[in-house]
Image (cartoon, helix red, strand yellow):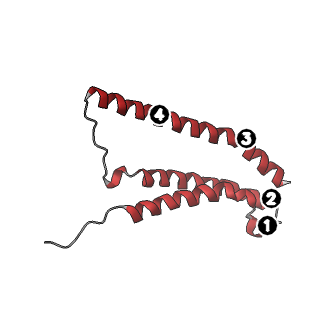
Amino acid sequence: MFGEQFAAVGFCLSPFVVLGFIVAVIFRILRHKEIIQSVNKGIALAEEKSGDHDSPALSWGIVIASVGLALILGLLPLGMINWEYPLGLGPWMLLGYIPFLLGLGLVIVHAVSRPRKSTMKD
């Protein structure tokens, strides 16, 4: 019963994944063309900021984890309808757990990979 619905939701969401990938590729191509044109004209590009507040891993991690948490909380009542699964946690909960754990992983990557400030004085 739920397997067919899960497959239908996945089938309906797959075009959005493909569309997101296409949009990301288009943005990459446009950014590359911008860099090439500025190099050909001799224009210096602004340096990318590398501060703690500009980390894409942290900002995307928080956004993706928040979406995953919202999906977890929104899908939890589905388990209360059908008590075949322990604590009402069925396979539909993967729609929330996967983005939540992915976002959590990005936050951990940010915490592990950021440069450490030295406390020793020369």
Q: Could you tell me which secondary element the residue under label 2 belongs to?
A: helix
The kind of residue on which mark 3 rests is Cys
> Of the residues tagged 2 and 3, which is closer to the observer?
3
Residue at left 75%, top 60%? Answer: 91
Residue at left 30%, top 66%? Answer: 116
Check whether the beta carbons of the residues at disc 1 and disc 2 lie within 8 A of each other. no
Mark 2–mark 3 distance (CA, rounded to whole Å): 23 Å
Check whether the beta carbons of the residues at disc 1 and disc 3 lie within 8 A of each other. no
Check whether the beta carbons of the residues at disc 2 and disc 3 lie within 8 A of each other. no
The kind of residue on which mark 2 rests is Ile
Mark identifier at residue 70: none
Lateral position of residue 74 relative to residue 28, left or right: right
Q: Residues within 10 Å of mark 4 (few under 14, many from 20)?
A: few
Mark 4–mark 3 distance (CA, rounded to whole Å): 28 Å
Of callouts 4 and 3, the N-terminal one = 3
Q: Tell me the quarter of the image containing the C terminus.
A: bottom left
Query: What residue is shown with label 2?
Result: 81
From the top left corner, tell me how far across and down residue 13 is, in percent: 69, 42
Query: What residue is shown with label 3?
Result: 12
Above-or-below relation of 19 to 55: above
From the top left corner, tell me how far across and down residue 9 is, in percent: 74, 46
> Of the residues tagged 1 and 2, which is closer to the observer?
1
Mark identifier at residue 29: 4
Query: What residue is shown with label 1?
Result: 85
From the top left corner, tell me how far across and down residue 78 is, in percent: 75, 56
57 and 33: which one is in front? 33
Q: Could you tell me which secondary element the residue under label 1 belongs to?
A: loop
Residue at left 53%, top 57%? Answer: 103
The kind of residue on which mark 4 rests is Ile
The kind of residue on which mark 1 rests is Tyr
